[in-house]
Amino acid sequence: MTPHPLIRVRDLNVHIDDHHILKHININIPDKSVTSIIGPSGCGKTTLLKTFNRLLDDTANVKVTGSVLVHDEDIYAPHAEVTHIRKKMGLLSQRPFPLPMSIYDNVAYGPRIHGIRKKSELDSIVEQQLKDTGLWEEVKDRLHSPAAKLSIGQQQRLCLARGLAVEPEIILGDESTSALDPLSTHKIEDLFVRLKEKYTIVLVTHILRQARRISDYIVFVYMGEIIEFGPTEEVLLDPKEELTKQYVKGFIS
Ligand SMILES: Nc1ncnc2c1ncn2[C@@H]1O[C@H](COP(=O)(O)OP(=O)(O)OP(=O)(O)O)[C@@H](O)[C@H]1O
């Protein structure tokens, strides 16, 4: 049975300039699961992900219609507050972007902005998040050295720790392992699988093997439309739609 949906998208349409980029999107993203958005290049995967935390707001000539409900709050309602919406979501991009400060300060950054000042409280948040992202043992002796000195894979886990430190409910990942070596990729994949106990995770990936390894649900997007959505095994191994079949066999890329 599909778990309770945390994000419900209703008749979402995105136009940029004169292009109809996302067309009549309807989907329920299950809570406490990993859902991967797959599809050929340029089909609208990243655009769909960006609608979940209103990252398209900064794009020129964009028009978004329809609704995205997180719990029961429509994040596109006129009174919706973008800061409040974004606090619920951590975003992990393709490449890590640590802030130009120490490892400790990267993780403490969000909590400090939200008013936490007590050192013991910040220490405990930093330790917990670095433990949750598997970095603690690797960095506990150099918490005050610059984040930029970490490897790219460690920087990506640090960015995840930074995002988790403000206690989001949802983690969005946009091809978050594409800049990483196989070992670091494996660590991030493992993290997503562990973190789904506490978070709802939505990922964009073009790597079908990755989608199969870590996702509970798959959304297949083609030319701005959702063609198929369902449990990973069903969509990847026994797809219902002809287009999905062609995509998983590698005939569409
Ligand atoms: N800011 C923008 N201005 C104009 N067109 C855009 C903009 N952002 C996205 N698009 C167009 O929207 C379509 C979908 O782009 P999107 O990045 O969502 O696709 P994608 O499936 O994530 O692609 P890829 O796998 O190559 O990253 C593309 O045709 C793209 O050119």
Image (cartoon, grey):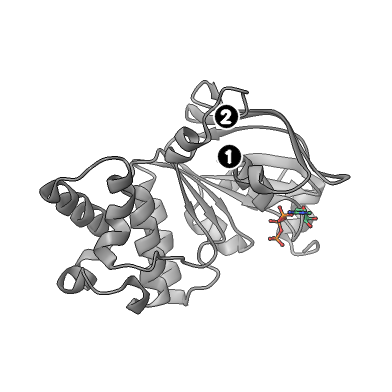
Give the percent coordinates (x, y) of residue 175. Answer: 57, 61
Residue drawn at 31 percent across, 40 percent down = 114
Say if residue 1 shows up in the picture: no
Say if residue 26 shows up in the picture: yes
Q: Secondary structure at mark 1?
A: helix
Give the percent coordinates (x, y) of residue 133. Answer: 31, 59
Residue type at mark 2: give it: Ile
Residue type at mark 1: give it: Phe
Q: Is residue 52 toward the left or the right of residue 252 in the image?
A: left
- Label 1 or label 2, whichever lies nearer to me, is 2
Q: Is residue 129 toward the left or the right of residue 163 in the image?
A: left
Residue for badge 2: 75
Residue drawn at 48 percent across, 26 percent down = 4
Q: CA distance from mark 1 to mark 2?
A: 8 Å
Q: Nearer the viewer, residue 89 or 11?
A: 89
Give the percent coordinates (x, y) of residue 76. Answer: 62, 28
Indicate the quadrant containing the C terminus: top left, top right, bottom left or bottom right. Answer: bottom right
Ligand 1 neighbours mark 1 (CB distance < 8 Å): no
N-term-proximal mark, 1 vs 2: 1
Could you say which disc has been placed on residue 4 in the image?
none
Q: Nearer the viewer, residue 150 or 32?
A: 150
Within 10 Å of the Cα at label 1, are there few (<14), some (14-19), or many (20+) other Cα atoms? many
Quarter occupied by residue 234: top right
Quarter occupied by residue 68: top right
Q: Is residue 239 toward the left or the right of residue 189 in the image?
A: right
Q: Nearer the viewer, residue 60 or 248?
A: 60
Q: Residue furthest left?
A: 120
The reply to whether the C-beta atoms of the residues labelled 1 and 2 are less than 8 Å apart is yes
Residue drawn at 46 percent across, 75 percent down = 182
Could you say which disc has been placed on residue 52 in the image?
1
Q: Secondary structure at mark 2?
A: loop
Give the percent coordinates (x, y) of residue 78. Answer: 62, 23
